Image: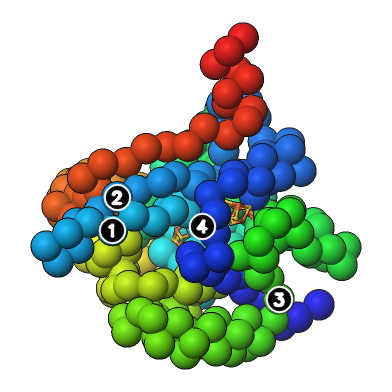
Amino acid sequence: MASRYAFSIDLDRCIGCQACVVACRTGNEVASGDAYITVSEEIRRKDNGFWGSFAHKRCFHCTEAPCVEVCPTGTLTKVNGLTAVDMAKCSACGYCTQACPFHIPHVVDNHVSKCVGCLDQVQAGEEPWCARTCPSNAIRFGEREVILAEAKAKVAKLRERYPNAQVYGETQLGGLGLLMVLLEAPGVYGLPEAPQSSATIQTWKTLVKPASAGLTALAAGVMGLAFVFARRQHAKEHAEVHTAAPVEAAVVETPAQTEENHD
Ligand code: SF4
Ligand code: SF4
Ligand code: SF4
């Protein structure tokens, strides 16, 4: 086992084929109608023109993961750099959905749903389903230092054609466990330069959660209050992100979805 795993997604290599989406859903037996990851085609504004790319929406496996910090039941934990999920512990409170700066976790059928890093596969010595399935080698997985060095080497080559190419995730939130090889600045892809959880969540984490062992009733009240404020902050941040929202976004259907739609 590596000490700290990471993924990388190279947006110069991704062809939007959806094989990773299907492999993830099948390999992890994700419930019908749910998905741990999505890949969509997006066109965004850039300078005076437009920029098209494939957008991957999936857990970034943050090192300092706000979802882990707010989870009151220990459902979400860090294991070798990945953000693991113990579904049996989830109370469906939804705090993680508010805390995540990337709006990733969602609650389905009374439990949290997000990429689990295929931890069972990794612990068995296999690669995650998405990484082993990608036909263009756009998804890489392994020891974070190796994956990061590989991503940086790719960016150095890309800069001959794309001067703004960069690795996203080297330092954000303690270093992300999903690094993105971008051809342009993060904002062009709708990614925050400095993702962070809301101030209210930070306050809850540093002040309320430690005190909650002896002040359960008080903590529950403050948690409720924090949750209300967090929802407002979340809505505000969401609105800000959508200021740079795609001018046009077409979600490419997976073969499975296509079949469902034709049934
Ligand atoms: S991206 Fe969101 S769900 Fe994933 S580890 Fe970070 S905070 Fe948690
Ligand atoms: S690591 Fe596993 S759970 Fe996460 S996106 Fe890849 S296949 Fe899905
Ligand atoms: S399988 Fe690879 S090429 Fe296909 S959508 Fe996923 S990352 Fe992109």
Would you say the beta carbon of the disc 4 residue lies within 8 angstroms of ligand 1?
Answer: yes
Q: Quadrant of residue 76?
A: bottom right
Name the secondary structure under disc 1: strand
Q: Is 20 situated left or right of 101 in this image? A: right
Residues at marks 3 and 2, CA–CA distance in whole angstroms: 31 Å
* Residue found at the far top of this picture: 263
Q: Residue 250, can we see it?
A: yes
Question: Quick one: label 4 or label 2, which is nearer the N terminus?
Answer: 2
Q: Position of residue 243 (x, y in %)?
A: 14, 52
Question: Quick one: label 1 or label 3, which is nearer the N terminus?
Answer: 1
| Rendering quadrant holding ligand 3 | bottom right
Name the secondary structure under disc 3: strand
Residues at marks 1 and 2, CA–CA distance in whole angstroms: 5 Å
Which residue is disc 4 drawn over? 59
Q: Which mark is residue 151?
A: none
Q: Residue 225, can we see it?
A: no
Q: Is 85 situated left or right of 231 in this image? A: right
Question: Quick one: label 3 or label 2, which is nearer the N terminus?
Answer: 2
- The amino acid sitting under disc 1 is Trp
Q: Are marks 1 and 2 in contact (CB under 8 Å)?
A: yes
Density class for disc 2 (Cα within 10 Å; few <14, some 14-19, many ≥20) is: some
Residue name at image x 61 percent, y 65 percent: 138
User: Is residue 243 depicted above or below 142 in this figure?
Assistant: above
Q: Position of residue 199 (x, y in %)?
A: 22, 65
Q: Position of residue 136 (x, y in %)?
A: 65, 61
Q: Disc 4 or disc 2, which is closer to the eye?
A: 2
Residue name at image x 63 percent, y 20 percent: 259
Which residue is disc 1 drawn over? 51
- The amino acid sitting under disc 2 is Ile
Which residue is disc 3 drawn over? 142
Would you say the beta carbon of the disc 1 residue lies within 8 angstroms of ligand 3?
Answer: no
Name the secondary structure under disc 2: strand
